[in-house]
Image (cartoon, rainbow, N blue to C red):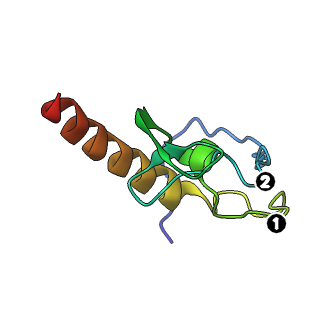
Amino acid sequence: MVPLTNTPYYMAKMVPLFVVVIGGIMTNIRAEVLDETLTAIPGLYSAGLDGAMMHKNVYTQNMPGSNMGNNVNSGRNAARNAKAYIGEL
């Protein structure tokens, strides 16, 4: 802990809110969106909560912030794979 020595001070009530997504879009490990036959749709990627599938059939309302690691990593993964896909065109 450190002392608060510089004024002015501000206070705010922070209420975490998590918009619930149960299941999301079906994706594979490359973050490619899958169709109804579980086949990757070329050039279509999903990241973050849209493609999470992390909490399929689980109600995660009371776990704010629990998906941030997945959001960052899946975005990086989707971008890396999209770049590779574009490079192959």
Residue 83 visible in the current orientation = yes
Up-down: is 68 above or below 78? below
The single residue placed furthest to the bottom in the displayed view is: 1
Residue drawn at (38%, 54%) of the image = 30
> Which residue is pictured at 53% across the width and 51% down the height?
27
Is there any visible trace of residue 4 in the rendered image? no
**Label 2 sits on what residue type?**
Ile
Q: Residue 33: x and y, percent?
A: 51, 43
What is the secondary structure assignment of the residue under circle 2? Answer: loop
Label 2 belongs to which residue?
22
- Cα separation, mark 1 vs mark 2, equals 6 Å
Q: According to the image, label 1 marks what residue? A: 58
Q: Nearer the viewer, residue 44 or 54?
A: 44
For marks 1 and 2, the one nearer the N-term is 2
Quadrant of the image containing the C terminus: top left
The structure residue drawn at horizontal position 75% and vertical position 63%, both measured from the top left corner, is 63
Q: Are marks 1 and 2 in contact (CB under 8 Å)?
A: yes
Is 45 in front, or is 11?
A: 45
Q: Position of residue 83 (x, y in %)?
A: 22, 36
**Residue placed most toward the observer, 72 or 55:** 55
Tell me which amino acid carries mark 1: Val
Quadrant hosting residue 73: bottom left
User: Going by the image, does 50 lie left or right of 85?
Assistant: right
